[in-house]
Amino acid sequence: MDEKPNSKNNGQMAFPPGPDEIIPYHLALKFISNPIPILMEIANKYGDISHFKFGPTLHVYLVNNAYHIENILVKHNSNFIKSPGLRLAKRVLGNGLLTNEGSAHKIQRQLVQPAFSRSRVKIYGKIILEHCLEYVDSTWKDSMVLDIHKEMTNMTISIISKILFGTNNLAISDIDKISNSITTIIEYINKLRLPFLRFIEVLPLPLTIRYRQALRSLDKLIYAKIEERKETAESRPSNESNSLPGGTNESQNTGYFDMLSILIKSSDIKITENNDESTTNNDKAAKMTNQQLRDEVMTIFLAGHETTANALTWTFYLLSQHPQVESKIIGEIASVFGNEGNIDDNGDRMATFEDISKLKYTEMVLMESMRLYPPSWAIGRQAIKDYALDSRYVIPSGSVIIMSQYLMHHDSRYFSQPWRFYPERWSTEFRSSIPRFSYFPFGGGPRSCIGEPLAWTEGIIILATILRKWKITLEENAQNVKLQPIATLRPKNGIRMKLHKR
Ligand code: HEM
């Protein structure tokens, strides 16, 4: 390893322990294609704080300690920006919430927040339920074998499309267009992660052409919806509040009060610029330009479906391997739904938003599934100023920090039998006994997931709705199910599962 500029020990500067060499090119490729085992090995060997060089210049710190993670993500978050890896996504997401930085991010977060309020999530819950039933009833047949990851991806893309644009304002052809474009864009961005594939960008290859077409087509659709909504907004009475419309028939209003309308409307709210260096707040009105609205919509499309689809995929897979957990969840669903209330075409009572809070065991199953298979498996940050991590180490400006949910969630310091799927561990006492950042599937601090309440609602409703009617079994050898940790933690080559009507 090169000189040791960083430690205050003995007047010398030193790096934390770590592989004592620059990660060579072949290892770098291995790292990019399957980073989890390499990071686990480093953490096991070198402990809570380790360091390695990625290529000749980039210093990387692997931080595997709940206290330090909390400091980085929450207390000292202004010392960092997102990691360089995410900048690739910027060409698609522009300055949407996920990729924005500094005061511009703070303003945008306030403008986007109303679209994720509790009352909105309640409306979205209805859309999720209706669409999940419609999707399953129209496409799933008894004894069908399908790739559950593909199914969950299609389902969550069409759900987020309906949430964004309204159930009544989207033709089936629009949803197909959105789904195809998003899949093409994600595949392309994933390929660009491999440095030797970056050259494809300048070549007129079918892959590059397809990506550009997909982006153009999605942009066109988003801008058209923005214009459409702005026209509708102008024709609204000016004294209309941004709160839920009165009356109980909310579903009739879901077309009108779709997420895009809320985003457009929230441009009128007063935002607070809280300056870190002073305690003064400056209230001012902010307007989102069409470009900014497009970036937020694109971000919500991309951030809002794949993570949820992965969480559901891994949960169905785990349930297929743990029949006793499956029976328990089915028992809970039966006891919550009983027979009274809204009845669907098959004579079953339909789930409501209120049911979600009663499905405690279902929530524990989802929690445990996201512990073992965190859809966001690592969070990266880059220091913009030197950062004193503790009394021993100063992380130099420009260094990258990796904090991995996958590593932390499998750490036996916090979770006994960490590889066991054991939803019962999530008792209230257990939850309050572990450090906040030993389990952080949705990140934390000012950059935490804005969609978390929606993700829980969506996950629980889809699980309950599907499990009530379908048993899903694994159609391949469990050994063949492999991880693919790219931007999110997917199953490599999907998971083939068989449907059995209950
Ligand atoms: C199981 C599902 C989900 C998981 C595990 C998840 C995870 C995460 C994580 C870990 C972050 C923080 C990344 C960082 O700190 O670098 C994040 C940010 C974000 N997520 Fe999610 N997410 C999920 C669902 C959703 C949904 C449903 C939406 C929207 C519909 C969404 C929208 C966003 C946005 C916009 C950000 C950026 C927030 C900001 O920086 O202000 N996510 N998500």
Image (tube, grey):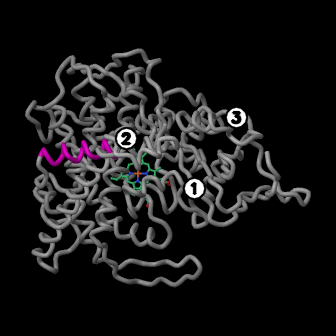
Q: Residue at x 59, y 62 (%)?
A: 80
| Residue 476 appears in the figure | yes
| Residue 36 appears in the figure | no
Label 2 close to label 3 by CB (< 8 Å): no
The first of marks 2 and 3 along the sequence is 3
> Residue 80 got which mark?
none
Task: Left or right? Give the position of 270 relative to 168.
Answer: right
Kind of residue at disc 1: Arg
Label 1 close to label 3 by CB (< 8 Å): no
The first of marks 1 and 3 along the sequence is 3
Q: Position of residue 367 (x, y in %)?
A: 44, 39
Instruction: Tell me if residue 49 comes above or below residue 25 in the rendering.
Output: below
Q: Circle 1 sits in a helix, a strand or a loop, which is it? A: strand
> Residue 44 got which mark?
3
- Look at the image and tell me in which quarter the C terminus lies: top left
Q: Is residue 181 part of the magenta span, yes or no? A: yes
Q: Position of residue 60 (x, y in %)?
A: 66, 49
**Callout 2: 10 Å neighbours few (<14), some, many (20+)?**
few
Q: Is residue 154 part of the magenta span, yes or no? A: no
**Distance from the alpha carbon under mark 1 to that under mark 3:** 22 Å
Ligand 1 within 8 Å of the CB at mark 1 = yes
Given residues 12 and 438, the one toward you in this image is: 12
Task: Left or right? Give the position of 54 relative to 133.
Answer: right
**Distance from the alpha carbon under mark 2 to that under mark 3:** 32 Å
Q: Label 1, on which residue? A: 381
> Residue 187 got which mark?
2
**Part of the protein shown in magenta:** 172-185
